[in-house]
Image (cartoon, grey):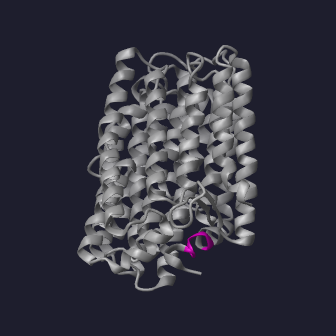
Amino acid sequence: MTTLILLPVLTTLATMLCTIFTVRRQHWQQWISLVGSGTLACVTLILLQQVLAKGPALTALGGWPAPYAILFRVDALSAVMLVLTALMACAALVYMASEVDPLPPHPLTHPLLHGALAGICGALCTADLFNLYVWFEVILVCALGLLALGNLGGRMLQLDAVYKYFAPNLLATLLLLIAVGLIYAATGYLQFDALHQAAPALPEALVTVLVATLLLALLIKSAAFPLYAWLPASYPALPVAVMALFAGLLTKVGTYAILRMAGDVFSPTPGILMEGLGWIAAITMVAGVLGAAYHWDIRRILSFHIISQIGYILLAIALGGLAPDSTSAHNAYGAALFYTVHHIIVKANLFLLAGLVFACTGSFDLRRVGGLVASHPLLALLFAVPALSLVGVPPLSGFWAKLLVLQEALAQGRMLWAAIALSVSFLTLYSMLKIWQEAFWKAHPSAKPQKTSRSLAPAWLTITVLSGITLLLGISPQQLLAVSVLAVRSLGGGP
């Protein structure tokens, strides 16, 4: 079990090294990536099964006694996130084997991609605040490399995307490092369990300042209001498969860290911070969906929807922190995890579908495409599943995810937050209908879309599987809901 905890990180790092050694043999590199992601999926599934059966797994590195050792801990919450990471890695790499993008992947794409996955796995496995910072930096460095490579635009487009991604994330990095230093100075600890024990002894005003600094850094990483513009400004410069992986995972690592900090390490979190988080969540929902309604590029519409949907997850976390009892808190945190699972799958799938729209029509601009219902009816059907799920149409997974969040908001008397969440759903429906009307229903503005001669079979397989998972989660949500609630029961020192 001890070795199993380290395998997600070790697997991704080993795959990264192997892809570096094969940069001149891209066919080998592609197969190594697929095998590595498949191995990661097997490892994380086994780890989830073990954690659900036997409880959290823990291992300490460095030869130091607690609480100073380098600690890795995997509980049900982090195990679920690890499985999702592996699933998205497999989906992106299978999709990448198709010829959706106009150019083949850069030889360094696979090493950087697995480096980012290593950072994600490390952030999910660590039980130490400083090492959480380190893994976030690994993600940042690899993300910047992937943005600089790109393949959908000229060099200036890539450099512009790098700058817009780097500037706010550098601010988040500095805030996170400052928070780590201040917390260590105040408590003398960095391990999560030690911080959980030490925080109640500190003055409440000091805890509020420390946690506020930490949460502010993580909110920027999550693309929450007001510093969210970096996401739609940078993601469209990425290749489609990498863009989908980023869309599914990167901001969710930020929300995972917020849930871990607010719901576990510093629980109970000062109420004023959770109240503020709830309002930030509400404004994030509105700002994101309005941006989506304004734009015509499919990638930008979907990027703004990432921001909007992050608001729902943050709202659930805030409701958990404001809950009057542990049962209500667990239900809210469980809703946050359920929503995260739903959103990772749906959002990544929508970006992959956008890639197929591009492959079939030659453009991401809705004003230059059309006629896909007639020319590609299967694509229209597969798009409808995640699009309606994102809106929250029953019985798809998005309906249950939003219902869980709304139930907690109404149970706590947060009528305005609930009303905002419902209104955002209607605006989400508008932007999804805009994509449907422009890309699928209306006639092509110049000519009927031509069938592409490029190999797209892996892409079709990927979106079909992800749409099937969305349907399955909608038709039978009980298992995911049970796992979600179980996964958050240990938060805040619970049983």
Image coordinates of residue 1 in percent, x first then y, are: 74, 60
Image coordinates of residue 384 in percent, x first then y, are: 57, 45
**Magenta segment boundaries in residue numbering:** 486-490
Left or right: residue 362 versus residue 314 is right
Magenta stretch contains residue 192: no
- Which of the 4 quarters of the picture holds residue 397? bottom right
Image coordinates of residue 207 in percent, x first then y, are: 30, 71
- Which of the 4 quarters of the picture holds residue 477? bottom right
Left or right: residue 244 versus residue 154 is right
Q: Main secondary structure of the magenta part?
A: helix
Query: Who's the residue at 65% across and 40% down the image?
Result: 12
User: Observer-nearest residue: 397 or 150?
Assistant: 150
Whether residue 45 is visible here, answered yes or no, is yes
Query: Who's the residue at 71% across and 59% down the image?
Result: 2
User: Observer-nearest residue: 454 or 220?
Assistant: 220
- Which of the 4 quarters of the picture holds residue 480? bottom right
Whether residue 396 is visible here, answered yes or no, is no
Magenta stretch contains residue 488: yes
Residue at the far left in the pictured view: 205
Q: Is residue 267 above or below residue 222?
A: below
User: Observer-nearest residue: 432 or 161?
Assistant: 161
